[in-house]
Image: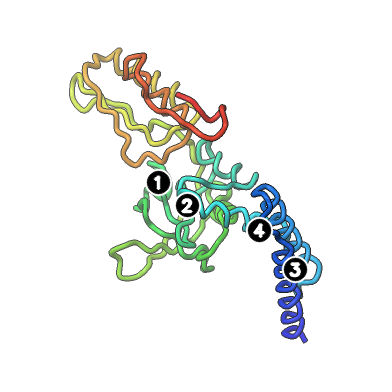
Amino acid sequence: MKKRSKIIVACALIFVFFWAEGSSNYGISQTKNLYQKIQVFNAVLNTIESVYVEEVNPTSLIDDAIRGMIKNLDPHTTYLTAEEFKNWSKTYQGYSGIGISFDIIKNKITIMSVMEGGPSHKLGLLPGDRIIEINGESAIGIKRNDVPKKLMGPPGTTVRVTVERQGWDKPKEFTIVRQKIEVESIPQATFLRPGLGYIRIARFSRTTGHELETALTNLEAQGLEKLILDLRGNSGGYLQMAVEVTNKFIPGGKMIVYTKGRIPAAYRE
């Protein structure tokens, strides 16, 4: 009976597709054609929600449809739900977890950066590692907003992750003790030798400009003559902070970066 219901639903969906598409007039304007496509989308969504054999979450369907649109754009364009944005912000503000930033690449949790001194760093996890299991359950195909729910938790609690790495014969399992992650943009600001300073910027958070100014002031008070600014492994962040950092080293009047788009507000130098 269930199989027959699915066949009936499939036929209903096919009918909706052909009914909507057949009503299109290929001589109409692009705007009207887009409106009709939206009508098709609404018809499909309503049909699935009302007659599909199993109950579905329409919000998840819409989010997945939006992500499908995003996939046709450049790789730097991303859609985040409100919850996903909240979790992303924690990466730059502080949280309790295992100390990594990640992305979903080819359906796998891929580590993009490892917080220096954090629990994952202490165990030797590296950018590029892929987490394929969490607490014994497969993480392949996991949705982005479900990852923090599984990896974050109260300080002192543990989480088991199975990691694969290029060059390993087989995946390895790690038991990671969660800890409070204090997110600092600049984990290192020191002297390599007298007069030669070294500053490493791990990410561009809202406090990066202030942190850099403090680090430079401290080094200058100790006789700074030359400086190495290390951006290796920088996980990115706020563009404005990157510009603010650059402004400290490049004379005024020179263009650092510009943005452009299809609306006036997108044009910035």
Q: Secondary structure at mark 4?
A: loop
Q: From the viewer's perspective, is the residue at label 3 or at label 4 nearer?
A: 4
Q: Which numbered disc flags the more N-terminal residue, 3 or 2?
A: 3
- Asked if disc 1 and disc 4 are in contact, CB closer than 8 Å, the reply is no
Q: Secondary structure at mark 2?
A: strand
According to the picture, the residue beneath numbered tag 3 turns out to be 19
Give the Cα distance between marks 3 and 1: 52 Å
According to the picture, the residue beneath numbered tag 2 turns out to be 103
Label 1 amino acid?
Val
Q: Residues within 10 Å of mark 2 (few under 14, many from 20)?
A: some
According to the picture, the residue beneath numbered tag 4 turns out to be 26
- Asked if disc 2 and disc 4 are in contact, CB closer than 8 Å, the reply is no
Give the Cα distance between marks 3 and 4: 15 Å
Label 4 amino acid?
Tyr
According to the picture, the residue beneath numbered tag 1 turns out to be 114
Q: Secondary structure at mark 3?
A: helix
**Rendered residue at 71%/70% (across/down):** 18
- Asked if disc 3 and disc 4 are in contact, CB closer than 8 Å, the reply is no
Label 3 amino acid?
Trp
216 relative to 148 in the view: left or right: left
On the image, the x and y values in percent for residue 187 come to 37, 33
